[in-house]
Image (tube, helix red, strand yellow):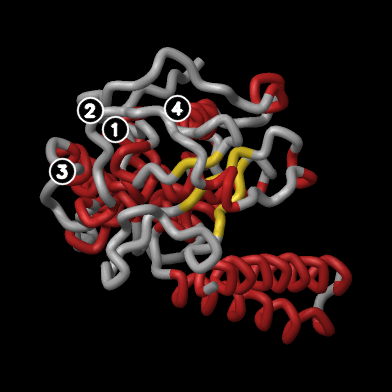
Amino acid sequence: MRTFKPAIRQSKPETRRYAVLPAKSIQDDDLHPTTLRVLGAISLHTNKYGICWPSRITLGRHVSRTPKTISMHVTRLIKLGYIRKLTKRGYKIPGWKRNSRYATNRYQVLYDGLQTAMPSKEQFYAPRPKIAEEYPEEMVIENSKGVKGGNNQLISIISQAFCSGVQKASGISRNVENQQKEAEILADMGVTGEEVEEAAANMTLELMKEGRDPPLSLNQVAIWAEHYKQHGLEAIDGIKGSMSNEAFQGYLKGAALKYLWRYKYKKAPVDDLRKAKWYLDKLLEEVLLDTVKIR
């Protein structure tokens, strides 16, 4: 059975001695272990009404994950009804710099699910536990410096493993630099270079038997090998993590159009229409999330 060990162990912030989580989350057999840990990390910071605003870097230090991975699990917690993001305009953080480029998320843990009432201003500003070393969102650095630190070596190993697997099976070279974003996601999930190289080689051989070209990207191999599902993620989550929000919405729109255009020519047109609807529903979900963020 696979264990979910962090790729890099980070130093831990000081915390209070307990966290109050929704009971449902403990009994949720489908909840990914890291998602549960992120919920626990958020709950370490809440006041008695379930309100807090820790940065992604602070949450990442609790569970040894990068800010990007924290965002992925936070999105899942919102979808599952365990937490709610509060608007910047309605709930202003005390001492927050108005002109800052970065906006730390305001969270409400939903102990009663989606039926949990929105907090009043008094509840939002109620005292929170004092936790040492809360890092602001300004310190989240998306390049090779800062929080990621030692993770760079693993990212490089996984990127090279993909290229090595493709080359061994086909003799065709792939660009290592183009695989960095996807390698970061897989590194955070604990996927090893050996797993990636084996999957890349096997996928390449299978495609070549069908007269097709080897995979162009590590993302294709991760989906094919079901690395995401093995680590509690759907393939669509991996695709989303490898591109910007705008690019991801374009991908969803293109996929929906593809199935709408071709359903008339298929033996099972209803299946293609259902797929188109799935992508459109996903696109609607992403647009609604963006709308909430803008507010």
Q: Position of residue 2 (x, y in %)?
A: 46, 20
Mark number displayed over residue 61: 1
Near mark 4 (Cα within 10 A), the count class, few <14, some 14-19 or many ≥20, is many
Which residue position holds label 4? 44
- Label 1 close to label 2 by CB (< 8 Å): yes
Image position of 120 (left or right of 127): right
Residue located at (52% from left, 79% from top): 250
Q: Position of residue 166 (x, y in %)?
A: 29, 51
Which residue position holds label 3? 152
| Foreground label between 3 and 2 | 2
Q: Does 55 sit above or below residue 207?
A: above
Residue located at (58% from left, 36% from top): 50
Near mark 1 (Cα within 10 A), the count class, few <14, some 14-19 or many ≥20, is many
- Label 4 close to label 1 by CB (< 8 Å): no
Q: Does 193 sit above or below residue 234?
A: above
* Front residue of this view, candidates 49 and 178: 49
- Label 3 close to label 2 by CB (< 8 Å): no
| Foreground label between 4 and 1 | 4
Q: Is residue 230 visible?
A: no
Give the Cα distance between marks 3 and 2.
14 Å
Which residue position holds label 2? 10
